[in-house]
Amino acid sequence: MQVYSLEIDDFEDSDFTLIGVHTSLPDYKLAFLLNRNLRVSFKRTNDIHKVEKQSEHACFSVFNYLDETLDANWFLIENKYHGVSNTPIENGLFGTIDETVNRTSYLIPEKKNTDFLVKIEGNLEEYLVYQIIQEINKMEQVMTSYIIDITTLRSKDFLIL
């Protein structure tokens, strides 16, 4: 007799809002501007390390802010990593040589045009989310920001912090 069956959706934590930000700013400058304009206090935390292939690693910066008044945990996460990797190349008679290659890795590959992600854990009212987006869009260094539908992301597991 079956007492209770678990569905895959039972393990899914979709109690967060995800905002995409397009800007050419480095991570620390964006964190500073968000702190000033949104009256938050992002602080740098441990980075996310992602192993893509055997020899290729990517490191994405993460900033965190705990908002006790709204009972929300905010994260500013870099989506792009620009790095250098050594790729072995067959050189015929002389064996293999390492070639240095510039490469770009993405935390969420489906959103390659998104430079940063603002993840807000907690139940925020919809109007508050739109106010946050409006404030981010007012910053002249930011091209645009918008809500990302997390149900469309295949690689959202990388956002578990």
Image (cartoon, helix red, strand yellow):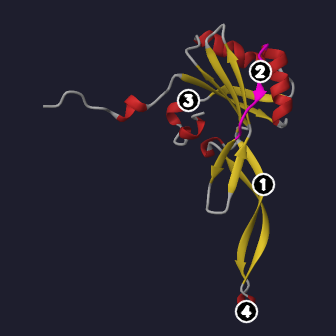
Residue 44 colored in magenta in the image: yes
Q: Give the mark nearest the N terminus, 1 or 4.
A: 1
Q: Is residue 80 above or below residue 119?
A: below
Q: Is residue 110 above or below residue 95?
A: above
Give, as a single range, the part of the protein colored magenta. 39-47
Element type at mark 4: helix
What distance separates the C-alpha of mark 4 from that of mark 3? 52 Å
Which residue, given by chain and number where applicable, does mark 3 sit on?
149
Q: Give the mark nearest the N terminus, 3 or 2.
A: 2
In the rendered image, residue 69, in percent from the top left (x then y), is placed at 66, 7
Q: Give the label on residue 136, or none.
A: 2
* Dot 4 amino acid type: Leu
What distance separates the C-alpha of mark 1 from that of mark 2? 28 Å
Q: Residue furthest bottom?
A: 93
Residue at the (51%, 42%) spot, across then down: 154
Which residue, given by chain and number where applicable, does mark 4 sit on?
93
Residue 157 placement, left or right of 37: left
Tell me whether circle 1 and circle 4 mark residues in contact (CB < 8 Å): no
**Quarter of the image where the C terminus is located:** top right
**Quarter of the image where the N terminus is located:** top left
Element type at mark 2: helix
In the rendered image, residue 151, in percent from the top left (x then y), is placed at 50, 32
Residue at the (71%, 16%) spot, across then down: 132
Which residue, given by chain and number where applicable, does mark 1 sit on?
83
